[in-house]
Each structure stands twice: as C-alpha cells, then as structure tokens.
Amino acid sequence: MSYNRGMVNIDVMYEGELHCTAVHGPSSSQLSTDAPVDNHGRGASFSPTDLVATALGTCMATVMGILARKESFPIEGAKVHVGKEMTSSGPRRIARLPVKIQMPEKTHALSAAARGALENAANHCPVRLSLLDAIDVPVEFVWPA
C-alpha cells in the first residue's frame, strides 16, 4: 500500500475536565471537544465520536461537490444529516451512522447516470472507506421529484 506524502498534522492539548483543543497544522484552525454527558462529560462541544459523524457527512458532501464542480451538477444547498448511535453494551464505540442526503430542488433534472455518479462518490468518500465494517452506515438519498 502506498501513502500520500501530504501528511497533515493535528496537535491536541488535553485541557482537563475531559475537554481538548485541537489545532489543524496547515491552517491553525482550532476546534474543541468535550466528553458527552452520557460519558461523564459536560457535552459542551463536539465529542470525539461526534467528529467521526461530522467527518463522514462533510466528506460525502465534499466529494459530491468535487464531482459536481467537474460535471457542472447544481448541488449547492444539498443537506447531509448524520445520526450517531453508540453501542449499548460491551466496549463503547460507534455502532451506527445513518446518513440522509437531501438533494436540492435544482437537481430534479439530473439524469439517472448523474444521480448514480453522485451517490457513488458519496458512498466511496475517504472517510466512509476508512470506517470499519463493524459500523453500520445506511445511506439514503432523497432526490426531488
């Protein structure tokens, strides 16, 4: 297996009280995480597992956007909703990430092939391909009539 040499560095500082701050190396953008209420935290920000769900939704939207830009598909305004369900027993982990992608009204005229290409792009985004098969990821596309 070959690896992309464009490695990105993320620096994380544990602030205490189950709160972390992460800094994105290339941009210096920051984000905070906090443990969820059901796991001893305050739920004051995204939890680490919330970021996995966020990464999935934004990755799907981004790769569809890359294809849309290349093919001039009008997908601006598409909405991606990702739910996150944790296991109820055993080791705590993400069990399910159901995804619902609502395509905007202006995509009503896209051909079946164009719709299929967008769906394929979303279902093969890097984050989706990185998730273990142990996580159920049902994806529903809602196209305008």
Image: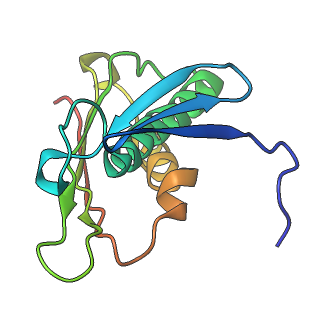
Q: Give the side of residue 71 with respect to residue 123, left or right.
A: right
Q: Is 55 displayed left or right of 100 in the figure?
A: right
Judging depth in this view, the residue of 49 and 41 nearest the camera is 41
x and y, in percent, of residue 109 in the image: 33, 24
Name the residue: 24% across, 64% down: 96
Q: Quadrant of residue 69?
A: top right
Q: Residue at x 33, y 44 (%)?
A: 18
Q: Is residue 40 above or below residue 91?
A: above
Image coords of residue 123 (percent x, y): 44, 55
In the rendered image, which quarter is residue 42 located in?
A: top left
Query: Residue at horizontal 29%, vertical 68%?
Result: 93
Residue 121 or residue 26, whichever sits in front: 26
* Residue furthest out toward the bottom: 90
**Image location (x, y in percent) of residue 141:** 26, 44
Q: In the figure, is residue 35 to the left or right of 61? A: left
**Figure check: 17 above or below 137:** above
Residue 114 pos. (x, y %): 47, 39
Work out whether 53 lies above or below 107: below
Rendered residue at 28%/31% (across/down): 45
